[in-house]
Amino acid sequence: MTHRKIFLLVILMATGLLFGCSNTASDEAASGRTVIRINIDPMARNLALTEDLARQFEKETSASIEIIRGPSDATERLAQYMNYVGAKSADIDIYQVDVIWPATLADHLIDLTEAFAPEKDEFFPAIVENNTIGGKLVCVPWFADAGVLYYRDDLLKKYDLPVPETYDDLTTIAAAVQEKVRAEGNADFWGYVWQGKAYEGLTCNALEWQKAEGGGTIVEHDGTVNVNNPAVSSALKRAAGWVGTISPPGVLTYQEDEARNLFQSGNAAFMRNWPYAWALGQSPESNIRGKFAMAPLPGGPGGRASALGGWQLGVSKYSKNPDLATKFVMLLTSAEAQKRRALEASMLPTRTGLYDDAELIEAMPFLPAMKAAFLNATPRPARQSGTRYNQLSSQYFRTVHRILSKQIEADEALKQLEESLPAIMGSGN
Ligand code: GLC
């Protein structure tokens, strides 16, 4: 190592940048304020709003809010959180908790029942129930998500094609639009983009395909494993057939934002994503502003299925300032903040009253339909698997990814999956 490099290393260590480390005591001594750190997904529009609310909170309290940007891949984010909580780290005061993690993180989060008692009834009861583990409210619903279909309204009109009702329709219509747009000279145009990387997002996509096909929900309410049946097999074979035909081969590495970037650049006819993509697609810098619309995901013999997503905020049991952290969670989840988050970032409220808000409905005419979408959305089997959900989902999305990338034949892979899941679920049979 050169002297210059050693010098740089010393500077980085001294400023704490190298290890992203925090020293709460000295931070506080330096600023005279209590530092509260929140770890969130830096999704563009929500980050800006959270920063704004942090500055507002700082004016009203003695806190200094630091926003730590966690990974946007939910699977990686959980791994990061497990490192923090495993070490009982006080470095993070507030965690952004996926709808599938309350059981996994419950032991590391404080009970917010009392703080939220006066407001509890204003939230979707099902999400409150989801976030209540062993009688304790371990996190507060922040924004709600459900999978939706985005489509290029202008192109469907131009080519006189309908919005697909089923995945078979989608396959045909996406191919038709792709062929026509390519014939007009855009060789980079694709029919359908979605989330195909081996991570939590693929569990959501594949659950939607398999449920719509009539193949069940991975683990049913009574704990029965349901992955090895002809409907699941045909849903996954159809999806494998999209890769390299109507979907770019790279879709197998796509998360939400890769799909959105391609769709927003104007190079895809259809996209499966969450509501956040709406505000970004309609922004002045978007190539598709005013050219696209949103619809329910297609269905099949099993009806339509939309995975239930969404994020909560929980306060770490290891936080040195849980009261201030709780107050900040109250601000971030307040009706005013949720209304702004919906208007500015199209991240949808967890407070039911906002679905009747005239200003919000005017800005997002699809809002009332989304309330119904949340109420009917398909939960991932987190209730059934509890703290083992991540293991279960990882096994599922890895299997699906191998099928999609044609490393293994669907029926064989599903048989193996069916055999391996009961052990993860803990029943052993
Ligand atoms: C969205 C959903 C979340 C899901 C994730 C998967 O962020 O809100 O529930 O786990 O996507 O990528």
Image (tube, rainbow, N blue to C red):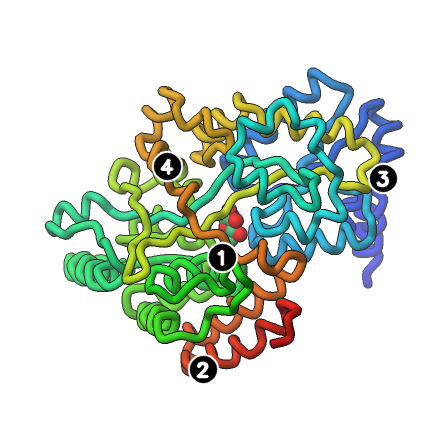
Q: Residue at x 57, y 55 (%)?
A: 382
Residues at circles 1 and 4 in contact by the CB criterion of under 8 Å:
no
Question: CA–CA distance between discs 1 and 2?
Answer: 21 Å
- Whether label 1 lies within 8 Å of ligand 1 gets the answer yes
Q: Sequence order check: which comes first, mark 1 or mark 3?
A: 3
Residue located at (77% from left, 20% from top): 62
Q: Tell me if mark 1 has few (under 14), some (14-19) or many (20+) residues whose alpha carbon lies within 10 angstroms of its own.
A: many
The residue to which callout 2 is attached is: 408
Name the amino acid, label 2.
Answer: Ile
Q: Are marks 3 and 2 in contact (CB under 8 Å)?
A: no
Q: Position of residue 90 (x, y in %)?
A: 81, 42
Reading the image, the residue beneath label 4 is 285
Number of the front mark, 1 or 4: 1
- CA separation in Å, label 2 and label 4: 42 Å
196, 331: nearer the viewer: 331
Distance in Å between CA atoms under marks 4 and 3: 40 Å
Write down the residue under mark 3.
23
